[in-house]
DNA sequence: CTTAACGTAGGG
DNA sequence: CCCTACGTTAAG
């Protein structure tokens, strides 16, 4: 796709992390005054554990996922904002490896921008409310 | 830039 | 209520 553009566009995702233009403020920035002697990775792991206890544990894969630091930051920011949620990674649909290739979403994938119905995360299937107790 | 996918509005 | 389309986010 020819997109004649040379302007250095700031990553939209990063904007929320420190800007929050007149829309909520998470104030969840990692701060500790003196932090630097210990491995920065350790700090990130720490944050990850913190967020895990706060709401959920979006860890993907049984062993330690590579990039836990980024995941922790993303999760923390996402929870503070009303950003898009990520798949839980533990439900059956999430565990699906490939698209069925036979559902509407698979056919309209190019225009619908939706994941295969068989792979749609159970958690993301709904938004809020708890299925009402009939 | 490219690809994948969530959120949501609109239509049926 | 479910399906489809588009915009947008998020990651590579
Ligand atoms: Zn499918
Ligand atoms: Zn899931």
Image (cartoon, coloured by chain):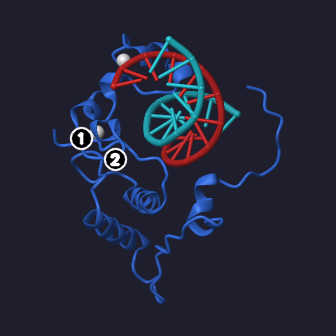
Chain colours: A blue, B cyan, C red
Position of residue A54 in the picture relative to residue C12 (left or right) = left
Checking the image for residue A131, the label placed there is 1
Chain ID for label 2?
A
Answer whether residue A98 is visible to the viewer in this image: no
Residue C5 at x, y = what percent?
59, 20
Secondary structure, mark 2, is loop
Residue A25 at x, y = what percent?
54, 70
Position of residue A88 in the picture relative to residue A112 (left or right) = left
User: In the image, what residue occupies the spot 44% across and 58% down?
Assistant: A70
User: In the image, what residue occupies the spot 63% across and 60% down?
Assistant: A15
Q: What is the C-alpha distance between the residues marked 2 and 1?
A: 9 Å
Checking the image for residue A128, the label placed there is 2
Q: Quadrant of residue A13?
A: bottom right
User: In the image, what residue occupies the spot 17% across and 43% down?
Assistant: A133
Query: Quick one: which residue is furthest to the bottom in this view?
Result: A34
Quadrant housing the N terminus of chain A: top right
Secondary structure, mark 1, is loop
Quadrant housing the C terminus of chain A: top left
């Amino acid at each position: 796709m020819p997109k004649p553009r040379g302007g250095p566009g700031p990553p939209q995702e990063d904007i929320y992390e420190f800007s929050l233009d007149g829309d909520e403020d998470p104030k969840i920035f990692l701060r500790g005054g003196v932090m630097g002697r210990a491995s920065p990775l350790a700090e990130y792991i720490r944050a990850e554990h913190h967020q895990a206890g706060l709401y959920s544990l979006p860890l993907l894969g049984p062993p330690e996922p590579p990039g836990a630091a980024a995941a922790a930051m993303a999760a923390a920011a996402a929870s503070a904002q009303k950003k898009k949620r990520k798949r839980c990674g533990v439900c059956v649909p999430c565990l699906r490896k490939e698209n069925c290739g036979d559902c509407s979403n698979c056919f309209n994938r190019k225009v619908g921008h939706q994941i295969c119905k068989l792979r749609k995360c159970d958690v993301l299937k709904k938004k809020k409310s708890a299925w009402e107790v009939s």
